[in-house]
Image (tube, rainbow, N blue to C red):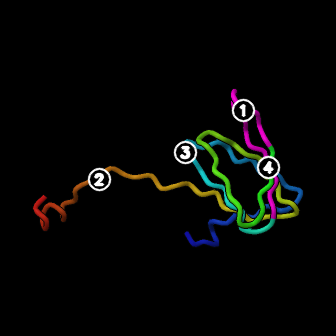
Amino acid sequence: MTDAQSVWHLDGGRALTLAGGPEARRLAVAQGRVWLTLSGTADEPAKDQWLQAGEALALAPGQSAVLEGWPAADFELLVPPTSAPARRSFLGRRFFGR
């Protein structure tokens, strides 16, 4: 995937709901301005927030957001890589004696 494919465009006057995911995510605005409403919890109410180009915020696992471009915006929704358990390969055993 190229960088251009990871950027989403949101036209002005359009809303987009980002459903809560199983892991933390990072929402970064590349261009324009976004008005978003973050889902709340039993302990904390939902809240509105503005993000401008160059700003980002972390979405907690399970947290959803509704975004609107003002007037339009480009953004990225990034998921941190997860670590896979280390596996010994055939080549590792053969060449390195493991």
Provide the residue span drawn in magenta. Answer: 33-47
Please tell me how crowded label 4 is: few (under 14), some (14-19), or many (20+) other residues with Cα within 10 Å.
Answer: few
User: Which numbered dot is residue 49?
Assistant: 4
Separation of marks 4 and 2 at Cα, in angstroms:
40 Å
Of pointers 4 and 2, the one earlier in the residue sequence: 4
Separation of marks 1 and 4 at Cα, in angstroms:
14 Å
Asked whether, in this view, residue 4 is left or right of residue 90, the answer is: right
**Residue position for label 2:** 86
Of pointers 1 and 4, the one earlier in the residue sequence: 1
Please tell me how crowded label 1 is: few (under 14), some (14-19), or many (20+) other residues with Cα within 10 Å.
Answer: few
Quarter of the image with the N terminus is bottom right
**Residue position for label 1:** 44
**Residue position for label 3:** 23
**Secondary structure state at the residue bearing disc 3:** loop
Expressed as whole percent of the image width and height from the top left, the position of residue 44 reads 72, 32
| For discs 3 and 1, the disc positioned in front in the rendered view | 1
| For discs 4 and 2, the disc positioned in front in the rendered view | 4
**Secondary structure state at the residue bearing disc 4:** strand
Task: Identify which amino acid the numbered label 4 is placed on.
Answer: Gln
Expressed as whole percent of the image width and height from the top left, the position of residue 77 reads 64, 57
Of pointers 2 and 1, the one earlier in the residue sequence: 1
Given residues 91 and 72, the one toward you in this image is 72
Expressed as whole percent of the image width and height from the top left, the position of residue 20 reads 64, 42
Discs 3, 2 touching: Cβ within 8 Å: no
Q: Residue at x 80, y 54 (%)?
A: 50
Separation of marks 2 and 1 at Cα, in angstroms:
38 Å
Q: Is residue 4 magenta?
A: no
Separation of marks 3 and 1 at Cα, in angstroms:
19 Å
